Image: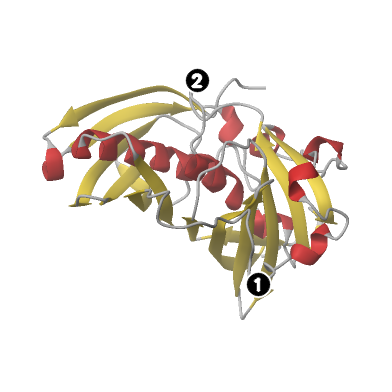
Amino acid sequence: MDTAFFTGLSTELDGSGARAQLAGAVDSSAACGGPWSDELQHGGPPSALLVRLAEQLAAEAAGRPDLVSVRIAAEFLAPVPVAPLTVSARVLRLARSAVLISAELAAEGRACLQARVWLLTENRASTGQHAGGDLDETPAGAADLDETSELGDEDPSQRPVLDMDGFPYARHLEWRAVSGAARRPGPATTWARARVPLLPGERLSTLQRLALVADSASGISSLVDWDDWSFANVDLDVHLMRQSQDDWVLMQATTELGAGLGLARSTLSDRAGILGAGMQTLLIRSRRD
């Protein structure tokens, strides 16, 4: 098992304030390998890395440490190889309580993943409730947790192991099943946590953690046979409404299919309640052609 998803990150800052930019390089470890090829990355690690770069640049540009990354909109322009990558990020908007960053990964001069990341300042005095408090509506997929009336009492490690060991990325996370199965068609709910850090010696931020896991929603809730069909996602959107110190993420995932297309949706929680949501647009293609 590798010790991190990425190593050797080096960046240089150019400019300041709204004109600040980052550029650098990073090495991908074998842990990033995805389900279709060990040489192509699963979407989770590179998406989480772009969140990490956005957080770094936003803190430098705004000159404040209290910004919280709350949303990533990632676009896969090409497969991301398990290889050395160049990284870059720039400021799109810099305001008093909001920063928008554009970040990119490239391989051999070709852009393969781009993302926009919003970072906001929290105001804990503005509301008296969070996701662990009273909710007006039951979140989608909550029926999967009938056995657990209080998430706060849940110990995910006591749940059955979800069989996700078929490729490198999956082996570098711990998976615990609540309902459904990775290779059985239909909705699924699972706990997941990283076995290794994104970068050596660094703890995942909440949005990094969600991005790392949420790109698996289409896999655990697939409606097609993995051996006969591919269902690569062209994008990944993750929205976050509060921070979490919990290493475990509960993902309640569903997939719907159209004519060669699909949509995977996930509700993302920790043991205190809902954290946010994810969405992926899928391209469904036969692997037999």
**Residue neighbourhood size for the residue with mark 2, other residues' Cα within 10 Å, grouped as few (<14), some (14–19), many (≥20):** some
* Disc 1/disc 2 C-alpha distance (Å): 40 Å
Q: Tag 2: residue type? A: Pro
Q: Residue at x 54, y 29 (%)?
A: 5
Locate residue 168, reporting x and y percent. 66, 34
Residue beneath disc 1? 137
Q: Quadrant of the C terminus?
A: bottom right
Viewer-side residue, 243 vs 176 = 243
- Image mark count: 2
Q: How is the image coloured?
A: secondary structure
Q: Is residue 31 visible?
A: yes
**Residue neighbourhood size for the residue with mark 1, other residues' Cα within 10 Å, grouped as few (<14), some (14–19), many (≥20):** few
Q: Residue at x 40, y 37 (%)?
A: 52
Residue beneath disc 2? 200
Locate residue 131, reporting x and y percent. 59, 56
- The answer to whether 289 appears left or right of 279 in the picture is right
Q: Secondary structure at mark 2?
A: loop
Residue 63 falls in image quadrant: top left
- The answer to whether 189 appears left or right of 248 in the picture is right
Q: Tag 1: residue type? A: Glu
N-terminal-most mark, 1 or 2: 1
Q: Quadrant of the N terminus?
A: top right
Label 1 with label 2: CB-CB less than 8 Å: no
